[in-house]
Each structure stands twice: as structure tokens, then as C-alpha cells.
Amino acid sequence: MQNIIDRFISYVTVDTESDPNSNTCPSTEKQWNLANQLVEELKQIGLDDVTIDENAYIMATLPSNVKHDVPTIGFIAHFDTSPDFSGANVKPQIVKNYDGGDIILNQEQNIVLSPSYFKDLLQYKGQTLITTDGTTLLGADDKAGITEIVSAMEYLIQHPEIKHGTIKIGFTPDEEIGRGAHLFDVEKFGADWAYTMDGSQIGELEYENFNAGYAKLTFSGKSVHPGYAKGKMINSILLANKFLSKLPKDEVPQKTTGYEGFFHVHHITGSIEESVVELIIRDHSMKKYLQRKKLIEKIAKKINKKYSKKFGGDILKYEIGNQYFNMREKIEPVMHIVDIAEQAMKDLGIKPLIKAIRGGTDGSQLSYKGLPCPNIFAGGHNFHGKYEYVPVESMQKATEVIVKIAELTATRYE
Ligand SMILES: [Zn+2]
């Protein structure tokens, strides 16, 4: 366990915050610091073909130690942290034998991690937790994943009696800004399938996510002095409001859960002359997702039809696009890759928590690039903020899950 703690701390104390406003890859220079450190470490523990490309994507190989043919499997994690909260000067605190009470993160600023608010804490009574000092995020998302993959590879190298096929590992920059899979060279990686170690609590196993799209609506108007506006003014703000009132009012993030999809209006700017509404569309079902996109188009067309004469053309210009798709479609034909992960957890006494992600993962993009890629827990909680924490025991278990998956895959193809 100490090994895992030391390794994790050596990663989270390096600032790797990514930046959505940058066009380079990696989006921030500082991500190279940890990337280069990881390359050295992977070589040092004895992995083969350790490479880092010009965009800081790291790959390495653990060669097979069996004679029979085994599919090549991969494990993937990201080393950047979320721009939502500072990742500079992370000072991890270690809480041994957690007693189930409040954890004071920062005495001076009175920042407390309390189980009365974060009830998940209670399931880790007696365990060792790593928390922040209340001024930064922790970066367990996803440095816990990296810790687990490196530790599992080291373990397999030190225990050649455990049989496994060829294993590939991949570490990416910029996942938090949605670009982790963009420049991932699936062909070079050369795995038949892979797992991202990027989920939250122990047991999580995910192979379904949203189909995701967006719409940008630009309403035009006609500004006239309000005192003389009768029959002349067109107020684009009211048009935008009219549009939004036509959307199903209960299909919003705050009123949906599980497999229920939604429309989410997240940005509006407006004046009489022009109002812009941005929204996102989410649904696990492709059929319903397409229906949602159609509905937006239908309302838009209706408004255009109504105002075309008065305005002299389309009063509403709209753009509707796709962002990512549900990986389920790509995983279902190779369902054994989920079964192996589930079996690995059961063999280790971990209760698998299989649920549909209400969001996306790098794995969904990778799955559509030809690398089927379910997501497995990395162990952390409360990502992207100062209350982030990770139980060391969960990182230990995730490490064991990786080892077990390697072993089960080798025996399955004997
Ligand atoms: Zn992550």
C-alpha cells in the first residue's frame, strides 16, 4: 500500500491542469513535466517499447509470457487535471484509519469534508483516505488510474508466474477538455480492446454513455423605439423565449436520471436585434436522440415559417451537430470484454456497479475509432474540486482488477 501512496503522491504533486482555450496539444506545457516523468518510470519498471509522441501521448508494452495466442488488451488513463479547479501546489493529506467523522481539510479557511454531506465517505470507515488541503483539487481523476496501471504492470513484471498475453498501456493528455482521444493513435496502440481506468467509486464498470449533440440558435429581431413600435418591432429575446417554451419542460438535467435524456440550455445572450441560445442534447437511445434533434428542427422551422413574411427571410438560423455517441453499440458485439472485467471484480470480492454514464468518456470516442473501450473505476470521489478524495484501498483493488483481467484473458484463450 505504501508503494501506491508514494507513487500517487509523486503524480498529484505535479501540476498538469489542461486549458480549453489553448489550441496546442498538450494544451499546457506543464503536462510535459509529468509525461516525461512517467516515461522514465515506465522504462525503469521494465516495460518495452516505451514511446512518447510529439503530442505527449505515451504508450508502452508488456510482452506476453504465454505460448498460446491471446488477444492484446490495453489499459488507458489521462494525466491532465480539470481546469474547473486549481491543480497547482497540491498538498495531499493522508487520513489513516478513517473514523467516519468530519475531516478538516483546512483549519484556517474552515473547509471540512463531512460525511453528513458526502455520505459516500462512510463506506470507507477504517480505510486510508487521501484528501486535499482544501485549496486545490486532488487529481485522483485520473492520476489514480495512472497509479493503478503502473502498479499493476510492475506487479506483473515482478510476478512472472501470473500468465498474461501482450498488454498495452496508454496515457493521454487533455482528456478533461474533451480531447484525450482526438490524437490517440489506435493503430499504433495495436490492442484488440482496452479499458479506461477513469471511473469513480470502487466497483464501477461502464459501457454505455450518452449520445450527445448541441444546437446553436441565433434569433434575429428588429429594434424600433418602444413608443413607436406597434406592428414594427420584433424582439428576438421574446422569440428565444417562445422557442424554449416549446421544449418539454421536464426533460432537463435537474429532473432526469438513469436512462432519461434531456435538453439542456446552458447559455443565452440577447438584445432586441439578436439573441443566441446554446443548448446540448443528450440521450442513451439513438432513436430518441435523433427525435430530439428533429424536434429542435421542427420548432425552428415553425418559427421561421411564421415570421418569414414579416421579417423577410429566416428569422432563426440554427446549427445542430453531434458531439459523441453511445459506445454501447460498439461494445455489444464484443460483450465478453465487459464480462471479463465483471468476472475479475467478482473474483476479487468487489461488487460490480454497472450503470450507464450520464456523460461521455474517452472510451466512447476510442470505441468509435475502432478500439472498444469500457470504463473501470479508479476509486476517487468528488472529482474536479477541493472535496476530491480517494481511498488507498480502492486504488489497491483497481490495481488487482487490472492484474486479474490480464490473467483471465490469458486463461480464456488457452
Ligand atoms: Zn477523468
Image (cartoon, grey):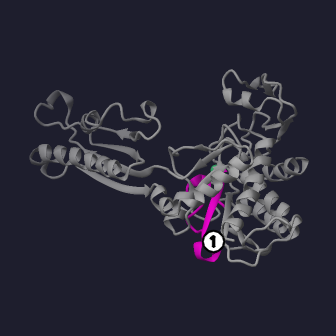
Where does the image place residue 350, in percent across and percent down from the top left? 71, 43
Please give the name of the residue rendered at 74% of the width and 57% of the height, measured from the top-left corner: 404
Where does the image place residue 209, in percent across and percent down from the top left? 49, 50
Q: Which of the pair 199/348 is nearer the observer? A: 348
Where does the image place residue 224, in percent across and percent down from the top left? 19, 36
Report whether residue 169 is seen.
Answer: no
Image quarter where the C terminus lies is bottom right
The quarter holding residue 47 reads bottom right
Number of numbered discs visible in the structure rendering: 1
Q: Residues within 10 Å of mark 1 (few under 14, many from 20)?
A: many
Q: Tell me which amino acid carries mark 1.
A: Ala
286 magenta-colored? no
Report whether residue 51 is seen.
Answer: yes
Q: Is residue 59 left or right of residue 4?
A: left
According to the picture, the residue beneath numbered tag 1 turns out to be 191
The quarter holding residue 107 reads top right
Q: Which of the pair 403/162 is nearer the observer? A: 162
For residue 153, above or below residue 400:
below
For residue 193, above or below residue 92:
below
Where does the image place residue 36, in percent across and percent down from the top left? 79, 66
Please give the name of the residue rendered at 42% of the width and 30% of the height, measured from the top-left corner: 255
Q: Which residues are magenta?
A: 173-198
Give the SS element for disc 1.
Answer: loop
For residue 250, above or below residue 140:
above
Please give the name of the residue rendered at 72% of the width and 49% of the height, measured from the top-left corner: 347
